[in-house]
Amino acid sequence: MTTKHTAPKYLDDGSPIAAFVMWLRSTVAMRKFFAVNWGHADVYSAEFMDDLTMLLEENVTIGLRSSWVRRVCVPIVMAQRELDKDGPAEPHVLVAAEIIAQLKEGTVRQNCLTWLKEKFPNA
């Protein structure tokens, strides 16, 4: 399996959504680096890392064990995937905002929604 790691479209615009997704991807890459070079990858819990890897590399969203991955990471990754779609921005921004609005983490939700409103005022 090969994984394509590309920066989300809006990363250079200060997007908290894109920055979070890039942090998640770097966390998975860091785990692999430690596992290969030092024989262990105990940066975070195995459950968290396994779920994060499944979400980012295998596109799995059902059956994840880590509640934080399910409640916070999945909606943000889904919103970023929506924003990365081609075509007019407005429908994608509206769907991304609906996804983000369902986040359980209030501070993360508010930061992401504020950025969407500032970046896309007409959507």
Image: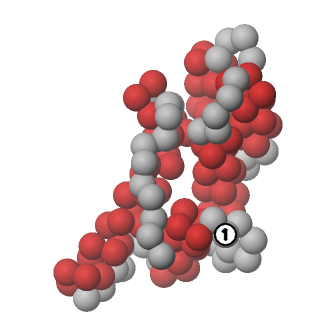
What quarter of the picture does the C terminus occupy?
Answer: top right
User: Is 3 positioned to the left or the right of 51 in the image?
Assistant: left
* Rendered image coloring scheme: secondary structure
Residue 2: % across, % down: 44, 70
Task: Looking at this view, name the residue that lies furthest to the top.
Answer: 122
Q: Amino acid at mark 1?
A: Val
User: Is 15 positioned to the left or the right of 41 in the image?
Assistant: right
**Residue 12 in which image quadrant:** top left
Task: Looking at this view, name the residue that lies furthest to the bottom.
Answer: 39
Question: Taking the image as drawn, is residue 34 in sight?
Answer: yes
Q: Is residue 53 above or below residue 15?
A: below
User: Is 3 positioned to the left or the right of 52 in the image?
Assistant: left
Disc 1: which residue: 60
Residue 120: % across, % down: 65, 17
Residue 54: % across, % down: 58, 72
Residue 4: % across, % down: 45, 58
Question: Taking the image as drawn, is residue 67 in sight?
Answer: no
